[in-house]
């Protein structure tokens, strides 16, 4: 029989590790510090990660794919869209288009307009 052990009290803090580009380190640190001090200032994603401005659709496709746990190859098999086209769409080298957005959205359980 296992002995009952006491839980150690915590101060309510959690350690978080992030991987960010070196140019964004100071912005992320400032944002984290503002959260700790309950400052009214908040930062938008665009302020912290300006390199993603205008790439919302490509990021949405990749994010929905990751959420569903699909590889590009699996998503290609589900949708009939070639894997290299999915890669090009995620990297902004190919437009998604309405028909493909509908196919992708059906497989990724999202609204197709999020991909346009």
Image (cartoon, helix red, strand yellow):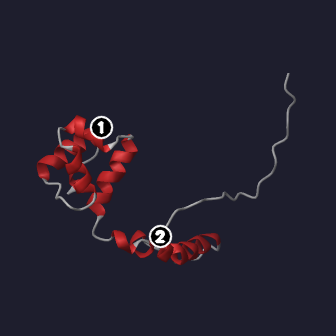
Instruction: Pick out the residue farthest to the top.
Output: 1
Residue located beneath label 2 in the image: 21
* Residue 99 place in picture, x, y as percent: 12, 47
Residue drawn at (34%, 48%) of the image: 64
Vertical relation: 54 (above or below) 85: below
- Which numbered disc, 2 or 1, marks the residue that appears first in the sequence? 2
Give the side of residue 45 with respect to residue 26, left or right.
left
**Residue 5: which numbered mark, if any?**
none
Label 2: state its secondary structure.
loop
Q: Is residue 75 above or below residue 50?
A: above
Which quarter of the figure is the C terminus placed in?
bottom left
Determine the secondary structure under disc 1. Answer: helix
Quarter of the image where one finds residue 58: bottom left
Residue 13, image x, y percentages = 69, 59
Instruction: Tell me, yes or no, whether the two marked residues, 2 and 1, touch with CB atoms within 8 Å.
Output: no
The residue located at (17%, 54%) in the rendering is 96
Query: Would residue 13 be found to the left or right of residue 45 on screen?
Result: right
Query: Are there few (<14), some (14-19), or many (20+) residues within 10 Å of tag 1?
Result: few
Q: Which residue is drawn at 48% across and 74% down?
A: 24
The quadrant holding residue 91 is bottom left
CA–CA distance in space, label 2 to label 1: 29 Å
- Above or below, 50 against 61 in this view is below
Q: Badge 1 is on which residue? A: 74
The answer to whether one can see residue 109 in this image is no
């Amino acid at each position: 029989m296992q002995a009952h052990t006491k839980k150690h009290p915590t101060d309510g803090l959690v350690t978080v590790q992030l991987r960010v580009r070196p140019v964004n380190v100071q912005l992320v640190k400032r944002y984290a510090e503002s959260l700790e001090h309950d400052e009214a200032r908040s930062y938008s994603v665009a302020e912290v990660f300006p390199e993603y401005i205008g790439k919302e659709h490509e990021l949405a496709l990749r994010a929905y794919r990751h959420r569903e746990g699909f590889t590009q190859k699996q998503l290609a098999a589900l949708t009939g869209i070639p894997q290299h086209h999915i890669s090009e769409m995620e990297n902004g080298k190919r437009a998604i288009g309405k028909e493909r957005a509908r196919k992708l959205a059906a497989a990724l359980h999202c609204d197709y307009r999020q991909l346009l």
